[in-house]
Image (tube, rainbow, N blue to C red):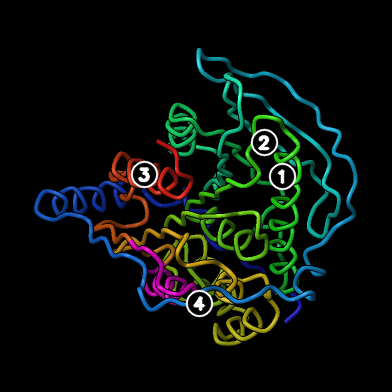
Amino acid sequence: MSDSRFIIDTKSKRHTSLKVMLESLLAFSLMCFSSCAHYRCDPTYVGPKMRSAEILRYYSYPKKTIEAKIETINEKKRYVVKRIVFPSARNVFGTENIKIDYYAQKKQGKFPTILILPISGGIDFCVRSFARRFVSSGFNCAIVHNRKTDLDDAESGEDVEDYFRQTVLDNRQVLDYLVTREEVDEERLGCLGLSLGGIKASLISGVDERVKCVVLGLAGGSIADIILLSEAEGIKDYSKEFIEDGIALETIHTELSEKVETDPIKLAGYMDARNVLIYVALFDRVIPRKCGYKLWEAIGKPELVCLFAGHYSSYLYLPYVEMETLSFFKRKFALK
């Protein structure tokens, strides 16, 4: 099946405003009568698997001094925001530079630093809202821009694998850069990802031991299951094309299962469930609830928050999620 094309949720903006409004009204009504369901990490969890030398080789790249272009794009009383750009040391999917919006503390000292991976549509208001809240609470934050070359450009299962592998390579290099900065405490590095960014956050956390704790918002696995079960319009449009070409969805599922090694489910066991917080939206049709629970179980049943919302209407929970996420990172990094 050499002419397949795959997409996770890169066309989420195609949903109609009516659907979002109805979903939002449903979530708001439920919020009036219900609260989030919050579960602690499984007390029987015994710890993560050891990463093999083969895995570390697969996600390796030439080590060299990072020569970054740095530009100040905003400045506040307590922090400064810089645009940081440098070349990728290894390109397996696209040839773009790595780009970061870096929120840094102005005062002297070393501070915990959070890697933030945005939704498929790119950096939006909620991602910036997280960054502003974190930096105002004593963290540095690095928002990693999505590459312009994305899953829309994938034409086979191998391409999908290259896309997610590139994500891991890029974010490992971002960590390489961050630990060279004098205000970054390299022993207190965390990661937050939302939607497709949550999938990416699970991958980098599964591969790189420098990420000490991670928050996954509306993520899931496996990639093959998301493709088969998602009701996102972009994915359904592609599925329709496959069916019209006489390609069964089961064939797509099998190819992705076999060829995508950089998959949240396959790397989940290397994450420490005691240092993971995951949010699942109970009415999510983009990253289906079943896929969110599957990732939760594969990690080892970490701390879990169930939101009574769909994928998009989860934005109504943003203040609550910000508060819980900030509390989680403060607790894990012993920050008052």
Q: Which residue is drawn at 69% across and 50% down?
A: 171
Which segment is the magenta one?
Answer: 288-304
Q: What residue type is labelled 3?
A: Ser
| N-terminal label among 3 and 4 | 4
State which quadrant residue 316 falls in: top left
Q: What element carries label 2?
A: strand
Q: What residue type is labelled 4?
A: Asp
Residue 50 in magenta stretch: no
Foreground pick, 47 / 53? 47
| N-terminal label among 3 and 1 | 1
Q: Identify the residue under disc 3.
A: 327
Using the image, tell me which numbered label, if any, was put on residue 225.
Answer: 4
**Residue 157 x %, y %:** 70, 74
Residues tagged 2 and 1 counted as in contact (Cβ below 8 A): yes
Q: Which amino acid does label 2 sit on?
A: Ile
Q: Name above or below for residue 23 compared with residue 134.
A: below
Using the image, tell me which numbered label, if any, was put on residue 287.
Answer: none
Q: Identify the residue under disc 1.
A: 174
Q: Residues within 10 Å of mark 4 (few under 14, many from 20)?
A: some
Q: What element carries label 3?
A: helix
State which quadrant residue 281 falls in: bottom left
